[in-house]
Image (cartoon, rainbow, N blue to C red):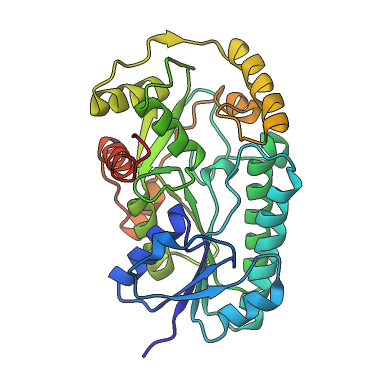
């Protein structure tokens, strides 16, 4: 029997999809989750669940014992937090801890899940790629800054001798988005008819299961030290919301809101969130990010890994169906 691979954040949206992809490819999987984490996304799967925390190095060394590979998927994916330092601690210090534990444990190869959030953007709206320049100063918000720093850390560990491949997923959607993620929340709000307006922006929408398959391809075929965008279809927000409206039998939003008008609403929403303790549906960082068209190219992954992504409409339909089946649209 071959040695297992460890998936951090295995109970999460992307992590549980990676677990399923690995199982389809015949890997033995050890799933890392915090003691307090809900592991419903792993129900019925032939995996070994181990409890640990990115901020508890001894627990990571125990989890990685005997593993041949590591998929570091775990991340704090929030565009707003009452205490932003929590985001940086999980994404930067947590990445440092698990990469050190992997080195001590002799893990053969690591796939580090970064994000397209770490990449530069082109002013003319053309799709960016892995070589589009970016600086820490370009990163808007604690999530993007922390992912940028975590990826830089992974590259440094790679230069120091660890076999690390980096993947940069775009905006994944699909089943098992339980919290949901910021992109999933947008789709859910639109499906509920709670998005009567939109701003002029765009996203690279990709099915979460295609992102997961890309992780396995990166582990098996990726070049050491290289990074790969795992995207799908570039769509304007207006087009995304129109597809969601069509799939749910609703009218698409017709009101285009200027970014300058959306920003005060975001500041108010965050102020209320600090009082109520409920995360805001619209955030200041989210509005600032929407000023840019976030389009990307997956050409490198397609050519070097054999990566393929299904149409965005299929991803959106699967996300809506999962939300419906699990009572989110009740």
Q: 9 or 167, which is in the foreground?
A: 9
The residue that appears at 33% across and 46% down in the rendered structure is: 326
- Residue 153, placed above or below residue 185: below
The residue that appears at 31% across and 21% down in the rendered structure is: 242
Which quarter of the image is occupied by the C terminus? top left
Q: Give residue 214's position: percent from left, percent from top.
A: 38, 57
Left or right: 31 in relation to 279: left
Q: Is residue 70 visible?
A: yes
The residue that appears at 53% across and 75% down in the rendered structure is: 50
- Residue 275, placed above or below residue 67: above
Q: Give residue 110's position: percent from left, percent from top.
A: 53, 70
Q: Give residue 189's position: percent from left, percent from top.
A: 42, 28
Quarter of the image for residue 281 reads top right
Which quarter of the image is occupied by the N terminus? bottom left
Q: 184 or 236, which is in the foreground?
A: 184
Q: Give residue 87's position: percent from left, percent from top.
A: 68, 48
The residue that appears at 49% across and 81% down in the rendered structure is: 68
- Residue 85, placed above or below residue 121: below
Label total for image: 0
Left or right: 281 in relation to 127: right
Q: 162 or 80, which is in the foreground?
A: 80
- Residue 102, placed above or below residue 118: below
């Amino acid at each position: 029997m071959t040695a297992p691979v460890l998936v951090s954040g295995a109970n999460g949206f992307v992590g549980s999809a990676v677990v399923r992809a690995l199982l389809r490819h015949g890997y033995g999987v050890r799933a890392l989750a915090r003691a307090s984490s809900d592991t419903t996304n792993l129900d019925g799967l032939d995996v070994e669940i181990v409890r640990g925390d990115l901020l508890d190095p001894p627990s990571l060394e125990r989890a990685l014992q005997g593993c041949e590979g590591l998929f570091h998927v775990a991340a704090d994916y929030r565009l707003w937090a009452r205490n932003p330092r929590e985001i940086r601690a999980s994404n930067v210090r947590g990445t440092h801890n698990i990469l050190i534990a992997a080195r001590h444990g002799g893990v053969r190869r690591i796939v580090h899940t970064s994000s397209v959030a770490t990449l530069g953007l082109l002013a003319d709206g053309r799709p960016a790629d892995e070589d589009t320049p970016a600086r820490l100063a370009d990163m808007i918000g604690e999530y993007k800054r922390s992912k940028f720093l975590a990826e830089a850390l992974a590259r440094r560990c790679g230069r120091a001798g660890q076999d690390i491949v980096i993947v940069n997923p775009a905006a994944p959607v699909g089943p098992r988005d339980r919290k949901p993620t910021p992109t999933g929340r947008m789709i859910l709000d639109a499906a509920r008819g709670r998005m009567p307006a939109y701003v002029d922006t765009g996203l690279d929408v990709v099915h979460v299961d295609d992102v997961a398959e890309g992780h396995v391809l990166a582990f098996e075929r990726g070049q050491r030290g290289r990074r790969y965008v795992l995207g799908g279809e570039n769509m304007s927000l207006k087009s995304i919301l129109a597809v969601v409206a069509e799939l749910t039998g609703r009218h698409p939003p017709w009101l285009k809101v200027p970014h300058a008008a959306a920003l005060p609403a975001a500041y108010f929403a965050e102020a209320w969130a600090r009082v109520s303790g409920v995360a805001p549906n619209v955030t200041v960082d989210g509005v600032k990010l929407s000023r840019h068209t976030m389009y990307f190219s997956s050409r490198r992954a397609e050519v070097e890994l054999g990566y393929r992504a299904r149409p965005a409409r299929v991803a959106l339909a699967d996300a809506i169906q999962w939300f419906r089946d699990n009572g989110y649209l009740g």
